[in-house]
Amino acid sequence: MKSIFIYYSLSGNGDLVASSLSDKGIDIRPVRLKKPMPKAFFLQIMKGGFLAGTGNRAKLDGFDPDVSGYDRVVIGSPIWNGRIVPAINTVLDTVDLAGKEVVFILTSGGGSAPKAEERLKSSFPGARIIMLKQPKNNEDELSKLDF
Ligand SMILES: Cc1cc2nc3c(=O)[nH]c(=O)nc-3n(C[C@H](O)[C@H](O)[C@H](O)COP(=O)(O)O)c2cc1C
């Protein structure tokens, strides 16, 4: 089964997931913002928390939405303010997931995100959701990536 991991990462947890999935033979496609997030954590929380909370769609820098060559599409998002991030909202608007096996990998500080999970379950019934608690600090969490 040919798989791709499409993900956004601000502080490296998603990158760690990407490198683990790459070792398992999964193609990797990082998503970058046209307008980068601020460097200061406080400003990240203010801006990211607000935009995620309002369901914002971010403008992406050169994103290729074509997944026609893949059977399985794995989508990675951090949790901001209980939700998936604006960059991944845009990915979900643009990528045609019809007929694909879909898996979400969510990373968060607390290890749970009921609002994000509910939204994804209702928009993508049948998709699997894997929740990881800060894998940069807890590498054991990567064992949940049982692909
Ligand atoms: C703007 C912002 C909002 C966040 N909101 C939450 C949250 O609501 N719940 C939570 O558990 N973690 C929250 N976090 C922590 C991130 O979800 C966590 O650090 C995640 O693993 C980051 O992934 P990354 O390193 O790939 O960017 C937030 C982080 C940021 C920057």
Image: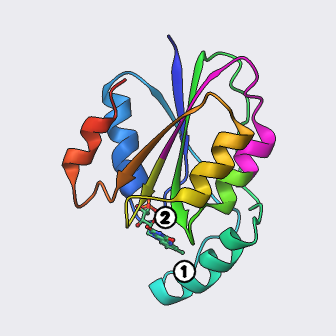
- Could you say which is closer to the camera, residue 133 or residue 112? 112
Residue 34 falls in image quadrant: bottom right
Residue under the image location 69 percent in, 61 percent down: 86
Q: Which residues are magenta?
A: 90-105
Residue 126 falls in image quadrant: top right
- Could you say which is closer to the camera, residue 34 or residue 41? 41
Report helix, strand or loop for mark 1.
helix
Mark found first going from the N terminus, 1 or 2: 2
Residue highlighted by disc 1: 44
Residue under the image location 54 percent in, 80 percent down: 44
Q: Is residue 39 left or right of residue 25?
A: right
Residue under the image location 75 percent in, 72 percent down: 54
Residue 101 is inside the magenta segment:
yes
Q: How many marks?
A: 2
Residue 78 is inside the magenta segment:
no
Residue 40 is situated, as x and y percent measured from the top left of the image, at: 48, 86
Residue highlighted by disc 2: 10
- Could you say which is closer to the camera, residue 126 or residue 86? 126
Give above or below for 42 relative to 119: below
Task: Give amino acid for label 1.
Answer: Gln
Q: Residues within 10 Å of mark 2 (few under 14, many from 20)?
A: some
Q: CA distance from mark 1 to mark 2?
A: 9 Å
Give above or below for 89 relative to 73: below
Q: Residues within 10 Å of mark 1 (few under 14, many from 20)?
A: some
Asked whether disc 1 touches disc 2, contact meaning CB atoms under 8 Å apart, the reply is yes
Report helix, strand or loop for mark 2.
loop
- Could you say which is closer to the camera, residue 40 or residue 73? 73
Task: Give amino acid for label 2.
Answer: Leu
- Asked if the beta carbon under badge 1 is closer than 8 A to the nearest atom of ligand 1, the reply is yes
Give above or below for 25 relative to 38: above
- Asked if the beta carbon under badge 2 is closer than 8 A to the nearest atom of ligand 1, the reply is yes
